[in-house]
Each structure stands twice: as C-alpha cells, then as structure tokens.
Image (cartoon, coloured by chain):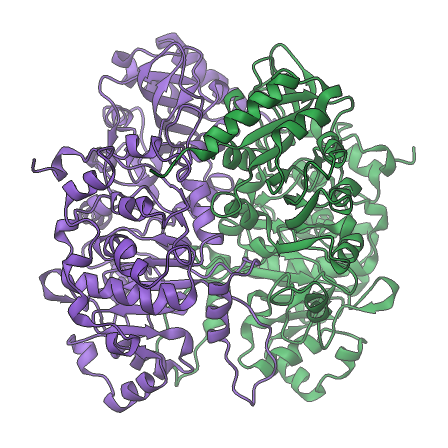
Chain colours: A green, B purple
C-alpha cells in the first residue's frame, strides 16, 4: 500500500521538534535551534527576500545553521538583496537557487556560480516564480516577514504585504512549514493580512525587518535630456495611443515622465486622457500628478518608505485596508500589470539590433524582477482598449497582397534609454553580453529581459523608433540604429534607409512631434527636489534620511 | 480643497444603512432590503458566479431589487451560469456586463445583447478579469459565497475557494462592500480562508450555495476514436517533448488521455517522465493515473463535487489545509497554468485556416474562461524546461541565410478535435463564425479563444499537424487542411503539398508514430465507467447522483 500522507506526517514531526524547543510564539534567542529542528537537508526553502521587505532576522539565523547538519538547501527567493542571501551558499548550507532579481548582489552571485557554490535553477520573473510555487517548486519551509502578529498568530503586514500571501499560501496548503518574523506581538491587530492557521511559528525579531526605499528618485538628479525624453514619451506615445493604464519601471527616465504630467501633459490637455490607472509602487515622484488629479487609482506591488501617511490621506487613490494603511500584493499587481495595463515603459542596460534588451552584463547575473511579465505582449488578453487596438493595428497593417488576417490588439512595450549610459557605455550593441553570461553561468539560453518581438518602441534622446510599423528585419534594425545616436551602432546606420523610415513616421524626432527642444528644461518638473515633493504632499510625505539634506 | 476619501465616506454611509436593517450576521429574510441599502445605482457589482461555485442566494436577492430604486448596475462575473445572472439585466436592474464565460447562458446572452438590454464591456480570460479588478474595474460591492462563517465573520470556503480571495481582496481594500452568503454559521471554523475584517456582512442562506460538477466525464461515453487521439497525443506530443507540467482542458478528449496514462503511457515507459505536475481541477478521470503513481502534484482552480474524501485521503498530491480539505484558488492556479506549465491541451468548436480557434458560434456569446490565459505563449516566462526549449527550437529553426536569432522557448498549445463535431458540423472552417458574432455583438474584434500564432499542434483522428515546423502561411494552411479529414476544408487540401509536409514530419499519421490503430479500443481505458472510477479510488470518490446509475 502506497502511503499518501508523507508530507503531513513529516510536517507533524518537524512541528513537534520545533515545539520541543520553543513555543508557537517563539523565543528569538532560540531561532537557530528552531530552524535546525524544522528544516531538513535538501529542503526547498523560500526565504522572503522581496524587492523591498526582507526577512533579514530569519536570513541571519539561516546562515548560523551548522552545514554538517543542514545542507544542500534549495533556496527560493524573489530577490537576492542581502549579503546573507549569498552567505547561505558560501557556508555550504544551500546549494541550489531559483530566483527573480539580484540587483545588489549580482556580482557576488556571478562569482559564486563560477566557483560552483551555487547551482542556478533558473532566473524568473516574479509572477512566474510564484506560479512554480504551486506546481514544481512548492516550498517545504517558508520564512517570511510581517509587521506584527497577535497571540493567535494572525499576521499584519501593514503596507508591505508584497510577496507574503503568495509564498504562505503555496507553503501552508501543501503541508509545509511557515515561520514569520514580526516586529512586534500585539493584542489586537489593525487588520489581518494572513490568517493564523496558515502560520506555524511567529518570532518577534530583535529589530524591525529591513526595508529598502527602492522606488524613490530625487528629482534634483533628473537631467534636461531626461526631460526631453519624457516630453517625447508623453506626446509621441502616451497621447498618440491614448494610454490610460500604465506600469512604469523604476528609474529616473520614468520619474521624469511622472513629474511633467501636471505641467507638460496638462498643457497638452491630456488630464483624464492618459495615465488614469496605474500598477505601480507608490513612487514619490507621482505625488504632483496625484495632487493635480491626473491619477485615479494606483495598485501596488509593495509600498515605499516615507509614503505611509500620504497614502493613508489619499484612500480614494490607493488600495488601503480598514486600518487605513495600504495593502500591496506583488502577485496580484503583477497580474494587473500583465493583463490590465496597456503599456509598460522602462529602462535597460543593453539593446541589440533585433531589439532584445538585457540587464545581464559581464560578471553580473542580475535577473529581471517584474519586467519580463509586464514588458511582454499579454497574448491571453481579450479585452480591447483604444491603445491596445491601435498598437495591434499598426503591427498588422496589411499590404494589399496579404490575406485578411485576424485582428488582435497588442501591448505597448517601450524601452526608454539614453544612447550612452554611465561611464560612456553605449546602450546599443551589436551583440548582448547576455550571450557570454549564458555561457559563464551555464544557462540554457541567454538571459534576455525583454525580447525584441515584444518591444514596440525604443525612445532615446534622438527620438522614437516605432517597431510596430517595421515590415522587415532590416527595417527594424535600421529603425533601432536610427535612434542610437553616436554609439558605434548608431554611426553604422544606413542613412538613406533611416531617412526613409523617418519619412514614413517609423522614426520620429522631437521636431517631427512638434516638440520645442528649448522647452526641455528642469523648469518643467513639477517638483525639482525632495523638498518640493514633501511640499506637494502637504507635508505628508516623509522621505528617508538618505534623501534629505535638511 | 479636493476631498480624497469619498469612497470610505460613502462606504461608511452604506454600512450604516445596512446595519440599520440587520446585523453584521444578517437575517436572510432581510437580504433584499440589505442589498437595497448598500447598493447604489451605477455601482460596479461583482457577483460570485464561478465555474463551479455560485452565490445563488445573493443572485436571487439581486433580482428582487426594485429597478426604480437600483438600476444601471455594471455587473462583473467570472461565469454567467444561472438564469438569475441574466434576469438582473432583463429586469432593468443592471445594464453593463464584463465577464469571462457564459457556457450555459450563451444563447440567452446573445439575445439580450441584440435587444440592447445588455451592453457588453468585454469578454475576458479569468485572470485578466481579476487583473482589471485592481486597475479599472474595481468592484464597489462584492457578493460572494463561502461554506461557513464564524461569529466574527471569518470565512471558510472549504475546497471551493475558487475566485473568492481575488474578488474580496480587490473590493475590501478599495473601501468597497463585501457580502458573503454562507451555508452555516459555526463557533469554530475548520480553517480561515478569508479574514473577518475583509468582510462586511455574512448571510446564512436558507439552502447551501449551488455548485456544479463541471469537470466530471463519464468514461462510458469515451469513443474509440478518442482513445486513438489520446494515444497520438501521448506518443506524438507528451513523450516527444517530455511534457512534465500540464494543464488539461475540460472534455472527453482530454479525459481519454488521463485514462490511458496508467495503461498506454505506462507501457511506453513514460511514468515519471510525463504528466508529473498539473494545474487542473480534481478531475475524477485522473484517479487511475494518481493511483498508478503518475501524478506527483495537482493545484486546482476549484474543486469537483464528489472528490472531497478522495482529495483528503491523498494530501501528498493535492493542496489541502490543516483541516484536510482542499484549498483551490483560481487566480493562483491560472498564474501557474500560464507560467509554470509546459503545455495546454484542449478542445474547441471551430478552427480556421490560420489556426485561430473559437467557441463563439452564431447566436451564442460564450466566452472562453481560462483557455486564452493558458492556451497562449507565456512570453514573460524565463525558466527553461526540455519541452519548452524543444518547442522554441522547432519554431526558430534557421535556414542558413538567416541571422543568428535570439533563442527562446515556447509553450506547447495543442488543439485536440475530431474533424466533425456534434450534428456533423465540421470543426474546420474557412472563416470563423466569430467574425459575424463580433458584428452582432458590436465587439471591436472577433472573439477568438486561441490565436493561430499561439497554437503549436492540431490533433485530430487523422493525425497531428505540427505548426511549429511550418515556415510559411501556406505551409501552415496546408498542414491544417492535412489533418482536417473529410470536412470541406480537408477535402480542399493540396495533396502534393500535404504529402511533402508529411515527409518532413510536419504532419504525422498514427502509423508514422508507430501506433497500431487496432490497439485503439476502450480496453485501454483504465476506467471504463463511473463505477470503475469509484473502485479505482478505493471507494473514496462519490459521484454526484446524475452520474450514477446504481
């Protein structure tokens, strides 16, 4: 007779071992012993390392395990953010890794992969990784972070719900073990984000969980070139397609767009016509647009430090709980970004001549976070919008010889980059570093963030290339070269063909859009520095220290 | 000064009006008055009508509202399943509709659209509709169904969690109103699926919520043609690509595949190599494969009536709570189906010569449920698998002239159909009815379930057309005609070209795969009728009455 309850039986033993060491509300001093009691070698362990919120107390405890007793863990992490996330491998406690993003640890990750200390399963986009938690990467143990717990073990995540519900659901309902670190134990929670019976142990951590203000951009650092690019984005794309539902990437290029909505876009009469609904973290740079009435709603993947009081005071715009604080949810916001937004616009490090882009550069394995999910055509989408239909029409404009093709809309996927990035590295290249990274890290295929056939527009300081209108691979290549400026790739353009593409409206220069470049000054920014943002928020926004010089 | 808390202020008034009529645990006799107190004309109202679970008591109450007082509701429904779902429009209480699937009500829906009583926003795939709940279709009021509530208002959904978490989260955290009908109020819930502070009113309904056993297929009705097609699927696709993670559609064609896993697939030595992980409702037809050890895990959109005890006895396979019963979740299972499965295989009603398929036929507006989400290439996917890489390679096989293209995997999307469906209607057509349906229902574009450029294989009793290997539109068309049998479309094939496609392995006949057609008998089915399924389950499966003749 086959036994069908091995997981629950094994779970029972682990819980009993854990309870022999400490209570369900666990003694933080016994956390290492608790982990050693409930984790077994070879386990898939999901450690909550998100874009912002970090279960850093549990990460530290995991590093303190004895690798002779616990080893070969298979780690699942949304984001490799902390040194501890890699220490686990360096110390021989874990050996295999599936993840989404590793920005701050990308160099060290590459090194550990090269020395064989980390065996990478795959790089994912967030929602893809969550999907696998329910199929073939279900965590045996989940180590998560919350703001507070009550004595029953109900969790309150506050505004930083982020990945917690997806992780806990996949683990708790497959007879896994869920351990949450919390900042405090309280009698009555402001609200319940995760029910107590989905959680096995709660540990009050000695210090609040670490949280990173990842989406704050100081307007003082926005250049006039970025203002010009933002003007082209608004006039040449947002207005052109009537884009009402948007996801913005992280970065100064999109922050510039946010900051000229109430000035430049307003002057074009675009209020109520573009940027009404957003899948977006509460970017401080969005405050002036919200105050000007541009923004009707924002659903967020996670929160942003310092925005708490502002969000609570603007409940008509943000998703908030009965307690007034935000409820974010990375899984559902990624779903919304994928299926309910008409446009993704973000930056990248390298673009090749087919339009493929990647942030994986030599010596770094960085991952892509949410970009692949939002920066790809959602082919399962069926509801129309003006923007989606127009993009689809442009992509399928038929020559008279062709058969009647089935019409279909398309998502706008815009890459916004200056032709040269930091240290005068060209953003446009003949071949992506991703090919070599794939070799080094033994990946099956090069790690591409956004594939060329999903990209609809490339926007640089030289203009916009509308790839939807290109009819051949060659046209596409020249359209890209035609906005690649003075990079070697841009210099190698076929000038005649580029002029022809411009005549046909495939390449648009600022002047073709009726944009006066002299207007592209920092004066257009609705907030010119952090203080302006605070002022725009009516004093509700409280920037983290590192962003304040007053 | 702009006011920023209109939603919460308005919510407060509605709740107060509701509480003036009945308590938070509401009197079912006062349900109509309660709804009239909390719903306002023009509201977006999400009524839980799922694939299986129905908030039918609340649907009935909604129909009893006075249209002079409450009208022009904008209804949001996953599935139009009950007559009440359309009565709401017929009576002038609602006027606008956004939905995903309307199988049982498709004819009446078409009629109400034609008479102008329903204005359709759009047809969606489930996950897309959920995504919009967080962006531009956030419900003002959600009417949901659960198994039980405690006196605090915590909800227990039991195995049929389905759409409830997604609906409630979007509503509760945008200051909307959530009303749940429950079968019973209890002192202590077996587990908490929805926390009490996300719910405003709980109504014990006089009868348990309606639930439909939608995924049960009686093996007695499976034909030998279907057995042959199942053999071709397993040998020509599952084994060929090594497909380990699968989503099956609903229907007899895929039920036949499930039922020959432990016989035919086992004889080919495929156990442990195909069909290990599933995003799937607990199909009774899967029981023999589970018992044979083929299936390692199943995550489900919803449950299936009669499977409760079987699921509880197989917790290593299914996702279950601490109480032992299943936790389903349509949103997360659709995410898993989209991103973590290598193959979708399902049936359709019509396929055109570009491979586009649709279930929208004249006089019916049926919607597509989850098929568009799972039957499309997940272009945001980044993790490789053998099946995904091989499909991608086939699609991108390069002729020597072509440039080195960026490699990329691809999802296997298989359409399995007999060339003639009921009433000798051909499944293959020169033009989809969807074009005319679009005109009739004033849709922006024809309602296509799966687009031709997402389909990788078409499988009929005549063989398999591998569209990945087609290099021109013409080859694609002839490959489709080449498996379209004696339909007019099939008869119009270019015989020479079809033979050439067969020589190149683009069209595969049973004999090309080494399949002996004489083996294609019902003897291969691991269960030949409902009683066999019960027996295979060790008596744990309890089919609903309509499926029992004993």
**Quadrant into which the C terminus of chain A falls:** top right
The residue that appears at 26% across and 91% down in the rendered structure is: B496
Q: Quadrant of residue B267?
A: bottom left
Q: Is residue B136 left or right of residue B524?
A: right
Of residue B445 and residue A38, the one placed in the foreground of this image is A38
Of residue B479 and residue A403, the one placed in the foreground of this image is B479
Residue B42 lies, with reference to residue B367, above or below; the image says above
Of residue A446 and residue B264, the one placed in the foreground of this image is B264
Of residue B144 and residue B226, the one placed in the foreground of this image is B226
Residue B455 seen in this snapshot: no
Q: Quadrant of residue A382?
A: bottom left
Q: Quadrant of residue A27?
A: top right
Residue B502 lies, with reference to residue A337, above or below; the image says below
Pinpoint residue A245: horizontal percent, then vertical percent: 55, 49
The residue that appears at 36% across and 67% down in the rendered structure is: B237
Residue B60 seen in this snapshot: yes
**Quadrant into which the N terminus of chain A falls:** top left
Q: Residue furthest right?
A: A550
Q: Is residue B219 left or right of residue B246?
A: left
Residue A179 lies, with reference to residue A374, above or below; the image says above
Q: Is residue A409 left or right of residue B180?
A: right
Q: Residue furthest left?
A: B549
Pinpoint residue A269: horizontal percent, then vertical percent: 62, 51
Pinpoint residue A224: horizontal percent, then vertical percent: 82, 58
Residue A120 lies, with reference to residue A459, above or below; the image says above
């Amino acid at each position: 007779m086959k036994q069908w309850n091995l997981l629950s039986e094994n779970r029972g033993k682990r819980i009993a071992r854990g309870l022999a060491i400490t209570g369900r509300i666990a003694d933080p001093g016994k956390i290492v012993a608790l982990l050693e009691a409930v984790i077994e070698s070879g386990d898939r362990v999901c450690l909550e390392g998100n874009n912002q919120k970090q279960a850093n107390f549990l990460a530290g405890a995991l590093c303190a395990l004895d690798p002779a007793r616990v080893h070969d863990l298979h780690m699942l992490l949304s984001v490799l953010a902390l040194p501890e996330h890699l220490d686990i491998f360096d110390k021989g406690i874990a050996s295999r890794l599936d993840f989404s993003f590793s920005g701050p640890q990308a160099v060290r990750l590459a090194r550990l992969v090269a020395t064989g200390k980390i065996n990478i399963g795959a790089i994912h986009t967030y929602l893809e990784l969550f999907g696998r938690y329910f199929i073939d990467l279900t965590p045996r143990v989940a180590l998560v972070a919350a703001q507070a717990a009550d004595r029953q073990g109900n969790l309150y995540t506050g505004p930083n719900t982020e990945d917690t519900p997806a992780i806990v659901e996949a683990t708790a309902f497959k007879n896994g073990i869920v351990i949450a670190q919390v900042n405090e134990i309280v009698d009555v929670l402001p609200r319940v984000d995760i029910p107590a019976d989905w959680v096995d142990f709660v540990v009050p951590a000695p210090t609040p969980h670490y949280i990173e203000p990842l989406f704050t951009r100081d307007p003082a650092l926005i250049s006039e070139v970025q203002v010009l690019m933002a003007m082209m984005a608004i006039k040449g794309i947002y207005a052109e397609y009537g884009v009402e539902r948007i996801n913005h990437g992280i970065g100064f290029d999109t922050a510039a767009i946010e900051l000229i909505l109430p000035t430049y876009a307003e002057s074009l009469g675009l209020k109520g016509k573009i940027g009404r609904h957003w899948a977006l973290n509460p970017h401080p740079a969005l405050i002036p647009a919200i105050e000007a009435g541009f923004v009707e709603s924002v659903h967020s993947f996670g929160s942003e430090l310092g925005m708490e009081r502002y969000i609570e005071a603007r409940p008509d715009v943000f998703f908030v709980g009965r307690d007034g604080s935000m409820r974010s949810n990375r899984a559902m916001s990624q779903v919304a970004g994928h299926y309910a937004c008409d446009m993704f616009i973000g930056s990248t490090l390298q673009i090749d001549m087919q339009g493929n882009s990647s942030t994986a550069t030599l010596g770094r394995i960085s991952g892509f976070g949410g970009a692949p999910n939002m920066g790809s055509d959602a082919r399962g989408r069926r509801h129309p919008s003006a923007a989606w239909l127009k993009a689809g029409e442009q992509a399928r404009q038929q020559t008279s010889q062709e058969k009647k093709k089935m019409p279909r809309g398309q998502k706008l996927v815009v890459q916004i980059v200056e032709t040269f990035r930091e240290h005068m590295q060209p953003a446009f290249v003949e071949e992506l570093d991703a090919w070599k990274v794939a070799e080094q890290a033994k990946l099956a295929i090069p790690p591409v963030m956004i594939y060329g056939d999903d990209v609809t527009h490339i926007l640089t300081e030289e203009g916009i290339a509308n790839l939807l209108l290109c009819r051949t691979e060659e046209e596409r290549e020249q359209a890209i070269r035609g906005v690649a400026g003075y990079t070697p790739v841009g210099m190698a353009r076929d000038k005649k063909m580029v002029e022809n593409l411009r005549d046909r409206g495939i390449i648009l220069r600022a002047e073709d859009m009726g944009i006066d470049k002299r207007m592209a000054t920092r004066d257009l920014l609705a907030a010119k520095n952090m203080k302006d943002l605070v002022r725009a928020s009516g004093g509700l926004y409280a920037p983290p220290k590192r962003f304040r010089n007053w």
